[in-house]
Image (spheres, grey):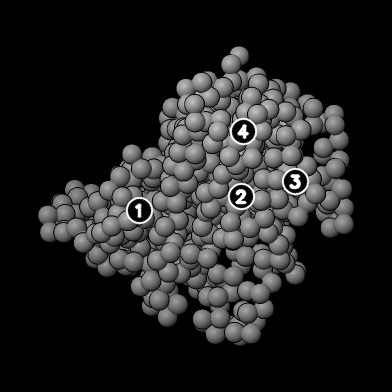
Amino acid sequence: MTLHSQEVRKLAPENDPLKMGMGWTLEDLSKPQIIVESTYGDSHPGSAHLNLFVEEAMKGIYEEGGKGARYYATDICDGISQGHDGINYSLVSRDMIANMIEIHGNSIGFDGGVFIASCDKSVPAILMGIGRLNLPSIVVTGGVMDAGPDLLTLEQIGMYSAMEKRGEITEEKLNYYKHNACPSCGACSFMGTASTMQIMAEALGLMLPGSALMPATCKDLKEVAYEAGVQSVKLARMGLKASDIVTKKSFENAIMVHAAISGSTNSLLHIPAIAREFGIEIDADTFDRMHRGAHYLLDIRPAGKWPAQFFYYAGGVPRIMEEIKSMLHLDVMTVTGKTLGENLEDLKNNGFYEKCEAYLKPWNIKRTDVIRTFEDPIGTDGTVAILRGNLAPEGSVVKHSAVPKEMFNAVLKARPFDCEEDAIEAVLTHKINPGDAVIIRYEGPVGSGMPEMFYTTEAIASDERLGKSIALITDGRFSGASKGPAIGHVSPEAASGGPIALLEDGDLIKIDIPGRVLEIIGIHGEELPKEEVDRILAERKMQWKPKEEKYKSGCLNIYSKHAVSPMKGGYMK
């Protein structure tokens, strides 16, 4: 097999001298050439340490007889971007990083790739980029940060901030929590989007078995990065491309793992977008169908008890897969060159689980305290659902595993707000009452880039008066840290004239999670026949006028003009 890099050398006579100009030797030019792309940068704890793993991968590539080349496309942090318009850049950054990976990979001519990232948008971005390049590829994720004192984790800061604003704790106490919640590098230590997407990368077969969501400070992770470098050269020589590994079956495996871990609702944006780059159709309805009857096993925050570092201690993705093995396609290929089933057998025989459980012993807990058995699940109907009705004709998303049972069936009064800032002020100043539905609109991809409504969800979930008696409904999205009665991705969005734009104060909204319904059933507090509701909504639509576009230039202007519905992945077409 002729390596792609050698074909490019023949076509571009400047190729050799330019590479030699940056220190490549004549011998290097004929080796398998591997792009090592990461989101390293001083941007946040999930990326600040990634160059350690870049260098380990480079060593592995060199010692296996390849030549590595470092490329960087630094990501941003949703946490640092929260609370101001910076968060509007979050989702579009995914597509921009994927664009850079495509540009870096296709403009040079590589034989394989190692792709290194940790967080919310960077991991889906590299997976999208891998789909576009279709090189022999392997993913290394930067792991998860340690928990702070008394197992303090970052997703609790929103709750404590809301408590301080309500006068329930002192500013000094809040500052203590803020200054101790992130004691190390790595992704945030809960099953948010970063942790979820690390797990999804392994579930798709693109990571070395058992390497997703390791503690970032664990020496095992450096060894994984080295081995990934070695394996990337082997994959290049084999010609085993990403599309040979990532198939419809592997996406179905990933969705079953998503159900078992109570993964972030943002996965319903990312998995369809990644699948599209591989020429595979996955949509939100695929999640709804596959989650029905799926066993939910993982007791990790925000829905569960433990910080995310305990996931690896309990056996990680392989342990989850062992428990749900009856629901997986075990014949799918992986980056080891073996099938998933073969990998799982190898792990049982090479002491992987014993090594993991040794980390649990100092905590005096069992692995089943973290990852339940298939026969003793936390739940048996998955963790997410797609709700539809005249409020969300194209659908909406709810993580029902985080919703109080009192809100599974409810009729609430609409309290519409045209931005998150107004909504959170109403929540914190006690202008929202039990039985209300807080509506936050014009926050979808077209409206403002689809930011997270994290602070509002935390303000509601941390309020004993509201946490089990109201809902938050939005055409925006939620942080993976969010919990409570939150329904997002309402489509069509308000900026596109969707029904959520037509709601008025006091309109009645029916939520039926088991029945998958999100419906406007009354006007101004009076329940009405469906035909009458539809007639009034049609009249309102005639009077509705689009808002002036929020961004008139730059990437958010481009995104607002080209983003598809969140129910299809929110990618730019």
Q: Tag 3 or tag 1, which sits nearer the N-term?
A: 3
Which of the two marks, 4 or 1, is nearer to us in this view? 4
Confirm or deny contact between disc 3 and disc 4 (CB under 8 A): no
**Vertical position of residue 124 compared to residue 543: above or below:** above
Q: Give the percent coordinates (x, y) of residue 369.
A: 76, 50
- What separation in Å lies between label 1 and label 3 (alpha carbons)? 35 Å
Q: Give the percent coordinates (x, y) of residue 39.
A: 57, 50
- What separation in Å lies between label 2 and label 3 (alpha carbons)? 12 Å
Which of the two marks, 2 or 4, is nearer to us in this view? 4
Q: Tag 2 or tag 1, which sits nearer the N-term?
A: 2
Q: Which of 237 and 362 is in front in this view?
A: 237
**Vertical position of residue 365 compared to residue 459: above or below:** above
State the residue position of label 1. Answer: 555
- What separation in Å lies between label 4 and label 1 (alpha carbons)? 30 Å
Q: Give the percent coordinates (x, y) of residue 196.
A: 59, 47
State the residue position of label 4. Answer: 34
| Residue under the image location 62 percent in, 33 percent down | 34
Q: Is mark 2 on a helix, strand or loop?
A: loop
| Residue under the image location 73 percent in, 52 percent down | 215
Q: Tag 4 or tag 3, which sits nearer the N-term?
A: 4
Q: In which quarter of the image is the C terminus?
A: top left
State the residue position of label 3. Answer: 221
